């Protein structure tokens, strides 16, 4: 995976993490998904941002959408 990617995923407490691929810790944590996307854009405007689906369909949240 490229270094200029971010993943935005929901935490169990309802907040959102901004992560690099294969990261052990979040680069940022925000209260809303929109804030997490904006934070990822501010860290690297050229990066691809992948957002976790926040609705449960079927077995769980296994889909990502690219912004």
Image (cartoon, grey):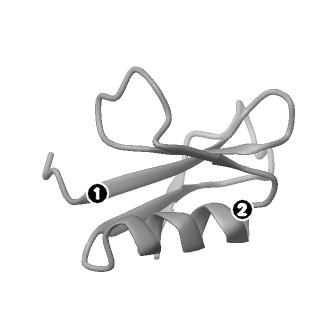
To which residue does mark 1 refer? 5
- Judge from the rendering whether residue 51 lies leftward or rightward of residue 50; answer left or right: right
Separation of marks 2 and 1 at Cα, in angstroms: 16 Å
To which residue does mark 2 refer? 33
| Among the two numbered marks 2 and 1 on one chain, the one whose residue lies closer to the N terminus | 1
Decide: marks 2, 1 in contact (CB < 8 A)?
Answer: no
Q: Mark 1: which secondary structure?
A: strand
- Judge from the rendering whether residue 7 lies leftward or rightward of residue 32; answer left or right: left
Relative height, residue 33 to residue 30 (above, below): below
Q: Nearer the viewer, residue 48 or 43?
A: 43
Q: Residues within 10 Å of mark 1 (few under 14, many from 20)?
A: some
Q: Residue at x 74, y 39 (%)?
A: 58
Q: Position of residue 65 (x, y in %)?
A: 50, 65
Q: Mark 2: which secondary structure?
A: helix
Q: Residues within 10 Å of mark 2 (few under 14, many from 20)?
A: many
Q: Residue at x 70, y 34 (%)?
A: 60
Q: Position of residue 20 (x, y in %)?
A: 34, 43
Relative height, residue 25 to residue 4 (above, below): above
Give the image quarter of residue 6: bottom left
Q: Position of residue 18 (x, y in %)?
A: 52, 48
- Judge from the rendering whether residue 57 lies leftward or rightward of residue 61; answer left or right: right
Q: Position of residue 26 (x, y in %)?
A: 50, 35
Q: Residue at x 55, y 46 (%)?
A: 28
Q: Residue at x 62, y 61 (%)?
A: 36
């Amino acid at each position: 995976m490229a270094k200029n990617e971010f993943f935005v995923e929901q935490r169990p407490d309802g907040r959102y993490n901004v992560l690099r691929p294969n990261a052990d810790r979040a680069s940022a944590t925000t209260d809303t998904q929109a804030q997490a996307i904006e934070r990822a854009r501010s860290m690297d405007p050229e990066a691809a941002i992948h957002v976790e689906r926040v609705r449960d369909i079927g077995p769980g949240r296994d889909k990502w959408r690219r912004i």
